[in-house]
Amino acid sequence: MLGWWLPENISTYAQGVDKLFVLIYWITVVVFVLVIGALIVFLIKYRHREGHRAEYIEGSTKLEIIWTTATTVIVFGLAMLSFPQWNNLKSIPENPDYVVQVRGVQFNWYMIYPGPDNEFDTDDDLELENELHVPMNKDIQIVLTSADVIHSFFIPNLRLKQDALPNRFLYNIKFNAIKTGRYEIPCAELCGFGHSGMIGYLNVHTQQEYDEWVKEQWPE
Amino acid sequence: MIAQSKLEMTDSQPFSNAKLGVVILLGAETMLFVGLIGAFLVLRMGNVTWPPLSHADIQLPRLVTGINTGLLLISGFTMFQAIRAIQSDRLKQLRVFLIFTGVLGLLFLVIQGSEWIQLVGKGLTLQSGVYGAIFYVLIGCHAIHVLGAVIWLTIVIGMALVGRFSSVSYTGVETCTIYWIYVVALWPILYFMVYFA
Amino acid sequence: MQENENISHEHDDDEHHEHAHDDNDTAQHTHKHDDDEHHEHAHHHEESFISKYIFSLDHKTIGKQFLIYGLLMFFVGGGLALLFRWQLAYPERPVPIIGASQQYLDDGEVVTGADRMWERIWDDDKEGWLETYMPNGVIDDSFYNMLFTMHATIMVFFVVVPILVGAFGNFLIPLMIGTRDMAFPVLNMLSFWLAVLAAIVMGAGFFVEGGHAAAGWTGYAPLSADPQWTGVGWGQNLWAISLLIQGFSSLVGSINYITTIINMRAPGMTFFRLPLVIWSLFIVAVLLLLAFPVLSSALALLIFDRLAGTTFFSATPEGGGDPLLWQHLFWFFGHPEVYILILPGMGIASELIAVNSRKPIFGYRSMVYAMIAIAFLGWVVWGHHMFQSGMRPGMGAFFMTTTMLIAVPSAIKTFNWLGTMFRGSIRFTTPMLHGIAFVSMFVIGGLSGIYMANTPVDIYIHDTYYIVAHIHYVVFGGSLFAIFGGIIFWFPKMYGRYMNDTLSKIHFWLTFIAFNCTFFPMHILGVGGHMRRIADPTKYEFLQDFQGMNIFITMSAFTLGVSQLILVYNYFWSMYRGKVAEKNPWNVTTLEWEAPTPVPHGNFEEIPTVYRGPYEYSVPGEEHDFIPQAQPEHAAASAGD
Ligand code: HEA
Ligand code: HEA
Ligand code: CUA
Ligand SMILES: [Cu+2]
């Protein structure tokens, strides 16, 4: 049903996030059904009836051991599955195709392109307000920072979220979008009275469109 | 029978309420300092050089403070003597040791105060960056505790002078001793951490 | 509120005044652990009205004071929630009544009766603060931030903790361990009045220049550390100062609780004969004792940053501060704090379930060990709030593992509650209904915790309504249902009367349904990516579909709110009109029910001696289906510990 589940995932990196989500979803559903099921059965079966007395049971070490180990196994297994995901999602990309610097400022995202010389802080840098342009099927690295308070760079469709820290540069944000379009980049960390409505836009282009866009920005 | 043995178990109280209360209080005090020390370490790690370049010229008074540390440790010892004295009803000694302890405590504060004045003169202030800030907050927090201990001690001294204590009832001295020893024991840790970091 | 105080105790006093007298003469001889506090204390029943009901030293009175204080603040905190819920459903639409009156002030025509009221309130000063915070009756964004910040701050620090720890702790500990009062009655009173002071300071924040704290209850720096980022001046300072005062209050309280439980248990009351609710309160007292000072240290640094010009949290290159320092300190306190919110709830639920299933707690000892394990693990999981904060990813793996491990002791508790009902003889009293609600709702809240504990998944759901759903399932579905159940369960002991059962049942069902309608859809919002702490969801294209759900949530929230009025009405009505209760109305084994009802000053005619564990229900070969802990040994009763 529309909007009642995860929004479309257009990231090559973060497919695993959805897989884990679904896995946990089923684990928790099963656990929930078992627990609540048992609860309801007990409530009906063992409700108070005249002349019927409760059974004096102080506990059962066997059962305790069973559910302790069962839970331990499940959660450890889950953790094991998640480690690799986590590491590859938060690792610094080796050789990205494009690098863009993103600076959060109350209450805007500034996207800074290095320009033809691929060097930041040179005079051919291009700074755009709230508009991020990238080609599809390419590894993009984001260098994230903030000028004032903590913001959070959130792209729902890429399952990407990372806080931007004032005067710190984070290099471990990367994505590879597999679908063209215009996606919102809300700020996800409370950053003041303008937090609500601090929105940037991710424009994913085909390679050709992107190259044309580049030409427009840096003529000659 | 079972119940009987249980009976003894619960009735015997190793500590009086007051003593236990103070010991528990120390738990909280410890966590307060854990918080501040944690902050100190985080900031220490966050800066490559310590003191940061902005404070390269600042040199914390290790020697004087070292001597000061000595004074405080001695006061711990004298405090301990005080409690020994009252345990064997030597009231006179109790008073002497208590007063001696209090004086040492005050001396510690005075020396530290003078050191601070000099540091501020050298330009190490709260506003001059985290190095100064965490120094004054952490050391200052301990200083306030020493001050509190001294005030508490003066009350105890007053009670000792009017002869409130005896070898059978000296909880007042005991609780104050526990607190004092704690404040004393805490200091060397802070000293080595902050002055030699 | 003090008004209520005074009235509330008048009657139960009249009923037992002379009672109290002769009782206290015996007090001296029979009390096993007499100490100084106690002697002076034992004479307190002689006293004037004021010092008996306002500056009372009696743990029962102080407990009731905390309870009424907490309920009052519950309405404040809830009212704030309803205010901002309106904004979330109908952004930019004037709030009813308050908003309407606003329009009246603008274009002077009377709209409703409420407006005449507001006219009287605001006419004299047209610059009342409503104009600043709600131009044209519409909540503006910075006011929205203040609203949810204070909502959470009040609910956590001024509602749940005061009621669970302050009210139940004070009322139950001396009664259930079988002693006449707390170890330090004076400190006990101090603890309450410090809490009141904290509440006043916190309230004052709304009326200072620049408005109240607006950085969330988590007060993340640098946002909270420098007025230039929020425009909030003294509001944030008062927030910090108030929490410092609250810190002292709970410090004093926890010292009192720990000392009392260690030193003043009745003869025979060994640690493993303590009821689980006392165990939980004991563990929570330790947590409070150790956790709050950490927050205090952080708040101190924050105040220095704001007032003394230090730069601990603002990472300016010159200053050399650290923007993550605050988060580490806050969550190192914060996670133990959230277990402070649930553990007493678990304790209360255990009592309710055991009593109403007429069965011993399934695996009493493992229940105790599980709570201790939860308390311990609570100290090493704080990083799970900071997965996306820029903390070293390596630490993420560690914190994920420790966090998920907490599912294990929680599992033990959950399954033991089920085991307690297994083959029981379950009575569906209203307290039991709340107990059942606690278990089921806590399981939902706990399971949603697993999603968030999972680092990759948390990347997506962090700072979305999924978190908000989790919060409320554990804290309202957990703690508050336990609180409601506990109030109804111990009310007969507190006031000597039953609460009206019909009203209680209506309140339960309305609350249970409205609660789920309010907070369950928030999971769906969260999975859809709906961020928390945003004043106007309609600004985002990808959230358009959710507006209908937001409206539904708001309507449920108002229903939930109104349902709470039933509880409060029932509470005060039953205090005077309720059916008079006998000594042990629910047939419970634990000591508080040995004391006469209403409980006189000094609690027991004679300090009881404890012969067995707290859950001797349906012991085979016994005629009654419960054996009080204080009933002397005989044939079939060597079991129990
Ligand atoms: C009463 C308060 C309370 C309680 C008890 C809990 C319990 C838990 N919490 Fe929660 N938490 C909060 C209050 C609480 N929390 C609050 C207020 C926040 C938000 C703070 C803010 O940002 O404003 C928060 C936020 C929060 C986060 C941060 C999310 C984010 O910001 O991105 C995380 C992440 O790991 C988390 C995890 C957990 C876990 C794993 C538990 C576990 O203890 C749950 C364990 C219980 C169960 C698992 C269910 C019972 C067990 C079984 C039925 C056995 C079978 C189970 C399995 C096999 C899995 N919580
Ligand atoms: C600790 C306990 C607790 C409790 C009991 C509640 C209770 C409620 N909370 Fe709370 N909430 C938190 C703790 C709690 N909350 C925390 C920690 C946060 C995070 C804050 C942050 O992000 O910093 C939060 C955040 C939070 C949000 C997210 C805000 C945002 O991120 O933008 C929402 C949104 O719906 C919400 C709603 C509610 C509602 C509807 C209730 C209802 O249960 C309230 C029921 C209503 C009443 C009890 C009021 C009854 C009074 C009347 C009917 C009289 C009417 C009076 C007037 C209208 C003035 N809460
Ligand atoms: Cu930027 Cu929120
Ligand atoms: Cu947590």
Image (tube, grey):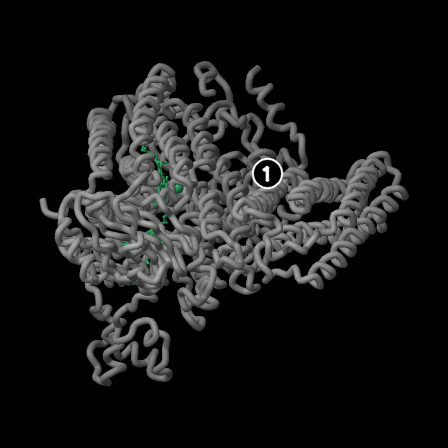
- The answer to whether residue C576 shows anywhere in this view is no
Q: Is residue C596 visible?
A: yes
Q: Is residue C544 left or right of residue C486?
A: left
Residue sitting at 53 percent across and 35 percent down? Answer: C178
- Position of the N terminus of chain C, as image quadrant, is bottom left
Q: Position of residue C492 (x, y in %)?
A: 39, 43
In the figure, is residue C271 to the left or right of C619? right
Q: Residue C370 appears in which quarter of the rendering? A: top left
Mark 1 within 8 Å of ligand 1, using the beta carbon: no
For label 1, the crowd category at 10 Å Cα-Cα, with few meaning under 14, some 14 to 19 and many 20 or more, is many
Please state if C427 lies on the left or on the right of C313 as rendered.
Answer: left
Q: Which residue does the image show at 24% across and 50% down from the upper left?
A: A155
| Image location (x, y in percent) of residue C60 | 50, 47
Between C340 and B182, the one lying in front of the other is B182
* Figure quarter occupied by ligand 2: bottom left
Q: Look at the numbered disc 1 and give the secondary structure of its residue.
A: helix
Image x and y of residue B53, in percent? 59, 54
Q: Residue furthest left?
A: A1
Name which residue lies at 19% across and 47% down: A157
Q: Say what amino acid the circle numbered 1 marks.
A: Thr
From this viewpoint, which residue is outermost toward the front?
A: A220
Give the residue pinned by disc 1: C259
Q: Nearer the viewer, residue C538 or A43?
A: C538
Q: Quadrant of residue C258?
A: top right
Residue C37 in percent (x, y) is at 65, 45
Determine whether A204 is above or below A47 in the image. below
Q: Is residue C364 above or below residue C381?
A: above
- As rendered, which of C153 and C253 lies closer to the eye? C153
Residue at position x 38%, y 19% in the image: A58
Q: Which chain is disc 1 placed on?
A: C
